[in-house]
Amino acid sequence: MSNDDAKAREINLVCMSGQGSVQTVQLLARAFFEQHGMRVRTQVAPGGRPKSSPVVSYLKASAGPIAGGPNFHPDDVLLFWSGLLRVAANRAHPTVTDAIARQRSGNLIINSRLAPGEIELPYKFSGAVATVDADSITNEILRRDPPPVGVTMAGAYIAVTEVVELDRFLALVKERFPGRLGEQNVEAARRAYEEVRIEREVVGASQEVPHPRGPEDRVDPLSRPPLPVLISEDKGRPRGYRGGAANIWRTKIPVSDDQLCGCDNMCISEVMCPDNTGFIVRKGLPHQGYRVDVDLCRGCGICAEVCVYSALSMANEEELMRTNPTYEGITVEPFINYSGEGGRS
Amino acid sequence: MTTAEQAQSVIRTGNQAAAEGARLARVGVVCFFPIGPSDEVGEHLVEMVNRGQLDARVIDLENERSVINAQITATQSGVRSTFSTNSEGLVFAYQPLIWSPYARVPIVVGVAHRSLEPPTNIQTDDHDTIIFRDSHWIQFYCENAQEVLDTMIQAYWIAERHDIQLPVFVTWPGWEVSHAAMPIEVPSQEQVDEFLPPYELLPGRDLLTLDMEEFYSNASRSGGEGASYIEQRYAIDHTLNVVAKQAITEAHERYVEVVGRGYGGLIESYRTEDAEVILVGLANMATRGRQAADAMREQGKRVGVIKVRTLRPFPSEAIAEAVGDARVVMAFDRNPVHTLFHELRSALYSHPGRPAVLGRVVALAGRNFSSRDAEELVDEAFAAIEDPAAVDELSWRMETVAD
């Protein structure tokens, strides 16, 4: 790394696609450039093709010259979804792990209902942690679900760091999104600016998360890669626990009323599922029923929409997990049985 | 950054810069078919047309193949056009894309690189235009948004010159440049107008005024167009490898004169004068190379970098001159067919001193390639000076070390 780059301030915005980090990082870049005359570079790393995959946006700002590309030494990290902490800790997604778990100090701003003290940091970190319930704020004002929280998170970020002036930043937001959309975003950012909760000296866990594609992870490229493990080998974990599958970001999950489930041959919900995660189970249950792979279901609700007998309904997952943490009646094990026996009929 | 610099600059991504370049070139037809990451270029151009900043006709068709055909037709009728696509879009339009250099249609196509499928991937590497290496397209590889803008304007000048008449790819890495914002300077319309004359068809090539009956009669009396196939191919090859090389250098010099900014013509060398090891890369692979070179120079190791701006025509002479007495030349190849490695081998085979040429396939599909990774590869290059047999000539870098 060249010396010039070491002096640059690096900010990583980590989100699921659709949450708005790409637009936000450009607005922040303009703010640094116009308010301080700093040189800026942004970059975007999309997580993958399907919707609802992680996206990381990087920003470097410096008074001196800077080279392109992130150096992965973030001073500030903005987490648009708190579940990504677990993804990083489990090294479930290399780009996300790099973007989050290599922050050792600085500011960590998390979109969460919890207070900063209640957040468990599963990797080595000491610095400021701030939380803001950006989902609720944005949802209330923009009435969109899932809410695009980018500008809201930027409001919280500015409250924590004061690196740019809020009003001048919000003027840029209005310029980028003319009309009502801009005003709503500005309102959301102002609320986040006021409501953010900060704890300045937080110490995380002691262990470091190793680099996800370091030399110790080297695989023999000529051997066939193992099939992806969709359920954990770890039997100690509750069944159906979402162990950090990186492409899941949902609020709802389909629940089947097995008594109503009536199509004998072809299940239209099974056909329509965009991720092939839902399927009819005909063996081993008192009555046939619709089950999903909870590691992959995106909660889009298409299955419930098309179900001929209206046997499927979408339930709020957070509420459901309080009474049914094992996803009894929603998922079956094994989720995908390559031997052709069991779960999938 | 000084206040004066700041006043002239605006924040733009690579895609926005490409759109600005096409606008300043006064394109008359904006072709559009969406595919990420390059669809933003079309979106920005359509916005410009809607806002009245650009007087152009927007044509959106059902697929990339039709779009390229529309671009060819527009260009043959004397109208400058623009279109950007990538990966599967380019492959889909393979037939008209191959047709255009041999029909001498000077279209300019922007490409924000994306890896070819399968497996499904939307990340970036060079492979999608590397597959057009053997088709007499002129290919530019740009490192950042500023270079995309400047190259886009130069591309029209080069392509449309009456002694060239060949199509040009202007490419930049997807996401890493296409969605990467930085302050850039946008030249004024007057400056661009001074540099770039309006598009004029080659005399006798204007299909709207051509006497078709006479044309076909002449063609059939002379044994058909196909009778001069080998002569036509020779003319195209000569044009690409001799005339276009001079034209690219000339375009660059003229652009520097008018706008005051340049990238060294065919190649851009960095600290190569006394270098023992020279790294060669396209686009932003050169950025990583420069970072590594700076770090290695601090340790007293003499490392230089050559950024190859045009893969076709391949600047063999310029590279040989910049390599000079260097002992090892290492290519950072961002494609699975290690093209740059082979190109360098052919270019340096007859070079006095004949340096060892090593190839390293890196950063495919957006895989992390840190400056520390580049430094480790440079160490391998220095090991090759001691004992060439101990180091692989060609290898793939898959794992990465933290910065």
Image (tube, coloured by chain):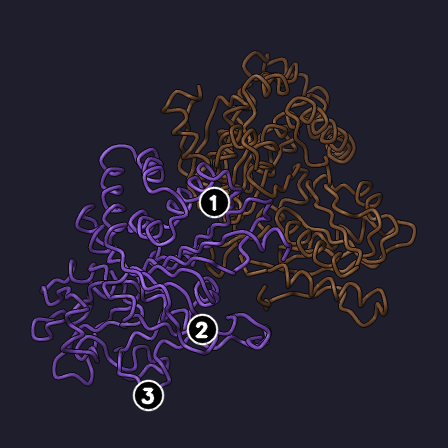
State the residue in front, A271 or A122: A122
User: Are marks 3 and 1 in one subunit?
Assistant: no
Which chain identifier belongs to the brown chain?
Answer: B
Q: Secondary structure at mark 1?
A: loop
Look at mark 3 in the image and give the residue it sits on.
A235
Look at mark 2 in the image and give the residue it sits on.
A124
Q: Quadrant of residue B232?
A: top right
Q: Is residue A256 left or right of residue B300?
A: left
Q: Quadrant of residue A328?
A: bottom left
Residue B272 locus on image (x, y percent): 79, 48
**Badge 2 amino acid:** Lys
State the separation of the CA atoms marked 3 and 1: 43 Å
Circle number at residue B179: 1
Dot 2: few (<14), some (14–19), or many (≥20) neighbours within 10 Å? some
User: Are marks 2 and 3 in one subunit?
Assistant: yes
Which residue is found at the position 70% from the left and 23% from the top?
B257
Tell me the quarter of the image containing the C terminus of chain B. Answer: bottom right
